[in-house]
Amino acid sequence: MDLAELLEIAEKERRRKKPIEIHCCVAASCVSSNSQSVKDKLSELLSNTDLKDRVEVVGVGCMGLCSKGPLLRNSVTNEFYCHVNLDNVSEVLKDIQGQKARIEKLKIDDPFYRKQMHIVLENSGKIDPESIESYIAEGGYLTLYQVLHEMTPQEVIDEITKSGLRGRGGAGYPTGLKWSLVAKSQAEKKFVVCNADEGDPGAFMDRSVLESDPHKILEGMIIAAYAVGAQQGYIYIRGEYPLAISRLQNAIKQARKYGLLGTQIFESNFDFKIDIRIGAGAFVCGEETALMQSIEGKRGTPYPRPPYPAEYGLWGYPTLINNVETFANVVPIIRNGSEWFSKIGTEKSKGTKVFALAGKVKKTGLIEVPMGITLREIVEEIGGGVPDGGKIKAVQTGGPSGGCIPASKLDTPVDYESLISLGSMMGSGGMIVMDDKTNMVEVARFFMEFSKDESCGKCIPCRAGTYEIHNILTKIIEREATQDDFEKLKLLCQVVKDTSLCGLGQSAPNPVLSTIMNFEEEYTSLLKKDT
Amino acid sequence: MEAVEKKEKVEQKQDNRLKFLNAALKRNLYQPDSLIEILHTAQELFGYLSKETLEYITRELKLPPSKVYGVATFYNFFSLKPKGEHTCIVCMGTACYVKGAAELLSEMEKFLNIKAGETTKDGKISIATARCIGTCGSAPAVIYDNQVAAYQTKESVIQKLKEWL
């Protein structure tokens, strides 16, 4: 493949497209509400009308507003059709024909979309995730061509460093720095790993990105591999995401066929291969050292760092590990320049963040917002607030490693540092809204039960500590605990946080600590009075 | 006569499954680090990992049995016990939890008189829980035989179980 061929594929695809496209969401959430048969039914209905030469129904990735699914969109008017099912799909057809139709419609300037900014999700919901041509028609793989032919690896790393991109997996380590560390390590082999083991309950950003725009992740990984000098890549993905796995497998096959993966990519002397490794249901494997153990076919137990994977990773070779969303940012940054990217966001957190908005909020789904937006804007304007006139009590971010932010702090701008100062963390991007009926001690116990079960058992603080914390929480809920137990709980949380081996144990007490910090009276009111 | 034919068919099917497992082993060049891939394939083919299957994989990959057993029991995905004819997995992710997944589960447990992770005595239905299946937008969600169903209620889950019984 060379540049002329790439441009020809793009041109051919653009010519093939019909003037009106009806985008039908075929990502997991809408599929669970039967969107696939809606798509087939609409295609069938269309084929019997004179519109069939001008209108085409295209399966696309996530359009964000999962709670209104199955969601369809008219590519010309940019209007969404909500809750389409087999019974009312004929109304969509009427609307396309310009007749009066009885179906709920949503405009693109709905508050849900107005405050969003799509970089990671730029193609999501617009292209067919099963087709590489569809991606190429939107300028896909053009950035890769430019990188391989016009930039040195160092220039690529410099761009990423200047952009200020930080790891989107949760900890926020500067991506450029990580890349340069791997690039500097001398070894005969190097690896690039994409961490798609999205285990946090309540988080589905990576799943949506992979289901909606798999080629963007591949392109980002190939660019990263070129920058650090790796020849082999792995995508470690959860076994719970069968649709994302099959879309990725399909994407890799297509990229290989076009010579975008394999040897002499774009007729340069750069070779790179990507394989998929499917996880088997262990939360701890999202931790990078455990993830590498799992790729090597072992039990996913973490080991102490240093040495960091950048020096000593998979099978002892330097390994670059980044999250799905981090890789998704690579192509836009190189294409539009680091200066463009660094203007978005706050001083220390650049760019956008994808959040999975769920829980007690009117509009749930996938959103992408610039860093620095306040939680209130996300929950009340984008999410539309709590349904049935309830009140927001707290917003949970960061899953079992994060914490609960009380309603009084909702005006905090979202970035890595501010969330940590509130006792939570950015995490991978799950955001669960809780209303005033939620019992915070129960919530803390829910997360502790999760951490207790998912503790790999290697280090004692985590294995025994999470178990004991869970016991005390149960005792509190059953009104059997005394002030003494409560003090012990606080101390134990601190010990587990300070002495655990890996991120799982170090962050497991966060849900308890943050609820104590913000809702202490809920705990104390359950304590037994001293007799 | 018919019974004999049926039995032959079953055996035939099992042979094929072994063939698929061998193909997966070959594709991975019998590399010990492909153990998790192989276990995935085996579970897909046989529904669970029996002692015999694990022993077979141990021999083929030239790994110590302790290691194979260790990996098979470490990951939640692998099951060493046969599953029911139908499986019903309740998502217990945060979003589903906030929207009442725990009540759905206890309703099912009461109805079938088994606990999560168990199978009914007649081998018809297994119920289990999942960490988070990532369809939080349509919480609470339940997976019936690999089909994700959105916005489940106490009534809808019991309805589905009744269909299976």
Image (cartoon, coloured by chain):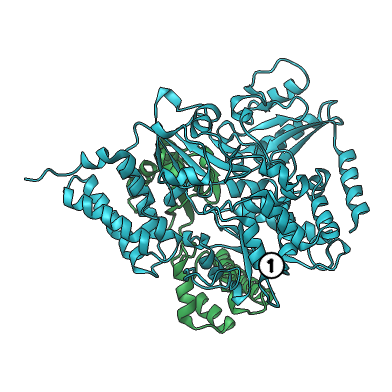
Chain colours: A cyan, B green
Q: Residue furthest top?
A: A100
Front one among A60 and A335? A335
Front one among A253 and A336? A336
**Residue underneath mark 1:** A183
Q: Measuring 69% from the left and 39% from the top, which residue is drawn there?
A: A125
Front one among A335 and B12? A335
In the rendered structure, the answer to whether residue A484 lies left or right of residue B75 reads left
Q: Measuring 64% from the left and 33% from the top, which residue is drawn there?
A: A71
In the image, residue A287 above or below residue A105: below
In the image, residue A58 above or below residue A445: above
In the rendered structure, the answer to whether residue A139 lies left or right of residue A100 reads right
Q: Measuring 49% from the left and 65% from the top, which residue is drawn there?
A: B78
Answer yes or no: is residue A95 visible: yes
Answer yes or no: is residue B116 visible: no
Residue A78: x and y in percent read 73, 27
Q: Which element type, helix, strand or loop, lies under badge 1?
A: helix
Residue B68: x and y in percent read 49, 76
Quadrant in which the N terminus of chain A appears: bottom right
Residue A505: x and y in percent read 40, 60
* Number of numbered discs visible in the structure rendering: 1
Chain letter for mark 1:
A
Residue A409: x and y in percent read 42, 34
* Amino acid under disc 1: Ala
Quadrant in which the C terminus of chain A appears: top left
In the rendered structure, the answer to whether residue A416 lies left or right of residue A87 reads left
| Dot 1 crowding, Cα within 10 Å, few <14, some 14–19, many 20+ | many
